[in-house]
C-alpha cells in the first residue's frame, strides 16, 4: 500500500468549512513540503477515537494550494466521516499521502471535459488547476460538468469557476439542468477529446459509455467507491481486461478501455 513517494504525516487542521449538511472542506498544513502530489491521488486518513474505524479512510486530494497545504473534501456518511467532520481547527490528523495513480495530463492541447458527481467533484478541482498550470489551457478550454442531488450539494462552485467553464445538473432541478450529468446538453452540443470523471459508479459508467460512443479517451477515478463507504477496505478489487486489480495500488485512476464496463 505504501508507495515509495508517499509519507506518513501528522497534519494540522487549520480550517474546517461546512459547505452543506453533507459536505465539509478541511484545510490542512503538512509538516514539511511534499512535492509531486497529483490529481486523482488520495490520502489514507486515520480517524482517531471513533468506534469501528480501525481502517484508514481513503479521501481524494481535492486541492494543493502549496507544497505544505492540502484540502480534503469530506462527505459525511458514516461514523468515521462524522468524527472527522467534528474535529476542531488545531487538531492533528495522521495520513499517508500521496497514494495511487493520477490522471494523465495530455501535453498536446485538448478540449477536456471534467465530470464530477457528489463527492467525486473533489479531484476535478485539483485536475483543473493542473491543466491550467501546464500553460496549454485557459479557462475557456476547460469544461467542468458537476452533478448533485440538489443545489445545496453543489459545492466549491466559485473555486471551479477559477479554472474553467462550469456546467451543473441537479436531480431535483433546483440548480442548473434537471437530471443526471449525462443528460446535460453540453454533451451533444459541444465536442471534447478527453474526458475525466469521478463520482458514483453508475454515473462514471454512463460517462464512460458516452466517451466510448464518441471514441474519446476517458479516465475514471475509482477510489470514491471506498471513500463513500460502499466498501471501505484495501481490497477494492476491480475486474479489468488484465484480470482482477486492486484499485488502491493499480488505480484509483483507470483508462476505461482497461475496465470491463
Image (cartoon, rainbow, N blue to C red):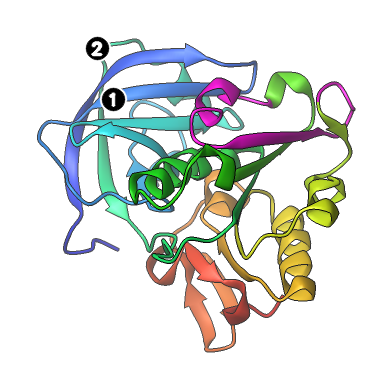
Q: Position of residue 259 (x, y in %)?
A: 62, 77
Whole-angstrom CA distance, mark 2 to mark 1, is 9 Å
| In-image side of 112 versus 42 (left or right) | right
- Looking at the image, which residue is at 38% across and 53% down? 41
- Looking at the image, which residue is at 26% across and 47% down? 96
The residue stretch that appears in magenta: 154-175
One can see residue 56 in this view: no
Q: Secondary structure at mark 2?
A: loop
Q: Nearer the viewer, residue 30 or 64?
A: 64
- Looking at the image, which residue is at 52% across and 44% down? 124
Query: The N terminus lies in which quarter of the figure?
Result: bottom left
Furthest residue toward bottom: 242
Q: Position of residue 97 (x, y in %)?
A: 27, 48
How many discs mark residues in the rendered view?
A: 2
According to the picture, the residue beneath numbered tag 1 turns out to be 28
Q: Position of residue 217 (x, y in %)?
A: 60, 71
The 10 Å Cα crowd at callout 2, few under 14, some 14 to 19, many 20 or more, is: some
| In-image side of 232 versus 205 (left or right) | left
According to the picture, the residue beneath numbered tag 2 turns out to be 90
One can see residue 141 in this view: yes
Which mark is drawn over residue 187? none
Examine the image and state in which quarter residue 150 appears: top right
Amino acid at each position: 500500500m505504501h508507495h515509495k513517494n508517499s509519507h506518513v504525516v501528522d497534519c494540522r487542521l487549520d480550517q474546517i468549512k461546512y459547505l452543506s449538511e453533507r459536505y465539509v472542506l478541511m484545510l490542512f498544513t503538512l509538516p514539511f513540503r511534499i512535492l509531486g502530489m497529483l490529481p486523482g491521488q488520495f490520502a489514507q486518513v486515520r480517524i482517531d477515537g471513533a468506534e469501528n474505524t480501525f481502517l484508514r479512510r481513503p479521501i481524494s486530494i481535492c486541492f494543493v494550494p502549496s507544497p505544505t497545504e492540502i484540502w480534503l473534501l469530506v462527505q459525511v456518511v458514516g461514523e468515521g466521516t462524522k468524527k472527522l467532520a467534528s474535529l476542531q481547527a488545531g487538531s492533528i490528523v495522521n495520513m499517508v499521502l500521496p497514494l495511487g495513480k493520477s490522471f494523465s495530463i495530455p501535453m498536446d492541447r485538448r478540449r477536456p471535459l471534467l465530470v464530477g458527481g457528489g463527492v467525486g467533484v473533489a479531484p476535478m478541482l485539483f485536475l483543473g488547476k493542473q491543466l491550467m498550470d501546464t500553460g496549454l489551457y485557459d479557462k475557456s478550454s476547460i469544461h467542468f460538468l458537476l452533478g448533485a442531488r440538489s443545489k445545496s450539494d453543489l459545492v466549491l462552485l466559485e473555486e471551479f469557476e477559477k479554472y474553467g467553464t462550469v456546467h451543473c445538473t441537479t436531480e431535483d432541478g433546483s440548480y442548473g439542468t434537471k437530471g443526471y450529468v449525462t443528460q446535460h446538453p453540453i454533451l451533444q452540443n459541444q465536442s471534447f477529446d478527453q474526458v475525466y470523471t469521478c463520482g458514483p459508479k453508475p454515473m462514471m459508467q454512463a460517462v464512460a459509455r458516452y466517451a466510448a460512443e464518441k471514441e474519446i479517451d476517458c479516465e475514471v477515478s475509482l477510489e470514491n467507491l471506498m471513500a463513500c463507504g460502499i466498501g471501505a477496505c484495501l481490497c477494492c478489487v476491480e475486474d479489468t481486461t488484465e484480470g482482477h486489480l486492486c484499485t488502491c495500488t493499480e488505480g484509483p485512476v483507470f483508462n476505461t478501455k482497461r475496465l470491463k464496463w
